[in-house]
Image (cartoon, grey):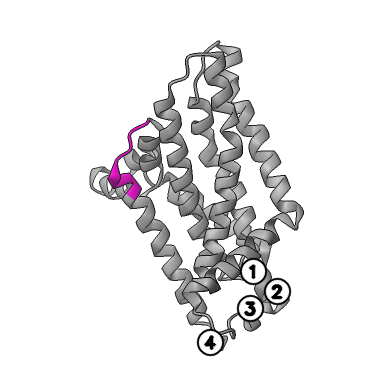
Amino acid sequence: MSKVYIIFKKELQSYFNSAIAYIFLAIFLIFSGWLFFQNFFVVNQASARGFFGIIPWMLLFLVPAITMRAWAEEKRNGTIELLLTFPIRDWEVVLAKYLSSLVFIIIALILSLGFPITASFLGNLDWGPVIGGYFGVLFLASSYLALGLFISSLTKNQIVAFLMSAIACFAAFILSDGLVIDSLGVFIGVILKVVGLSSHFENLSRGVLDLRDIFHFIVFSFFFLFLNIQSLNSRNWR
């Protein structure tokens, strides 16, 4: 695990050594703050519904912006050959990159905790949906990250990685959307409701901490991390 930690530390530091980390945090905090407080100031209601209703769509752009450089930049700079010749397993490299991006998301979420805390002093905030919503955002972001990292491993072009990741995350999210399910029939709709991410996120954002929803996000993330490892193995860099 020391090897994982070394790469994890390097990757996390690389975020803050570039402008992308600060741009991400600024955009996330500005928009999340506005979304969180708009109901409070417009309709005089302390609620996080607007925040957790739109944040999955924000993550569709913000998460691919984080993951697009993970492998694509390594390939473009030619450093991936050097990285994968070190005495370290592929899964350790994938895990380190995944954990570094996940910790970065956690830092952003921790910074945004000031909004619900402030709202709780200004009004009667229901903390159940807030806690569940934050868990939902964390698990949804972790799934997006795993998918985005896998797609980044397929190309050396960061723009292509960004666009493909955004489209793939969008597709994974809306698969269980009510409009999609109703248009495809009952049988397919039941399958899509299980596979898609939106229905599981909505349950958590309502404050319902169902282990089935959490398990789904974990399996989804592990599946695409596994594909990421297989993608590296298939390239025969060594």
Q: Amino acid at mark 2?
A: Arg
Number of residues whose C-alpha sits closer than 10 Å to that of mark 1, classed few (under 14), some (14–19) or many (20 or more): many
Q: Which residue is mark 4?
A: 236
Label whose residue precedes the other's in the sequence (3 or 1): 1
Q: Which residue is mark 3?
A: 80
Region rendered in magenta? 207-214
Q: Which residue is mark 1?
A: 72
**Toward which corner of the image does residue 157 lie, by quadrant?**
bottom right
Name the mark on residue 76: 2
Residue nearer the viewer, 112 or 182: 112
How many dots with numbers? Answer: 4
Residue 41 position, x and y percent, is: 61, 14
Q: Is residue 175 left or right of residue 167?
A: left
**Toward which corner of the image does residue 223 lie, by quadrant?**
bottom left
Determine whether the residue tagged by mark 2 lies in a helix, strand or loop: helix
Q: Is residue 70 left or right of residue 89?
A: right
Work out which residue is located at the far left of the displayed protein and give it.
Answer: 187
Determine whether the residue tagged by mark 4 lies in a helix, strand or loop: loop
In the rendered image, the vertical position of residue 10 relative to residue 202, given as above or below: below
C-alpha separation, residue under disc 2 versus residue under disc 4: 17 Å
Tags 3 and 4 touching, CB below 8 Å: no
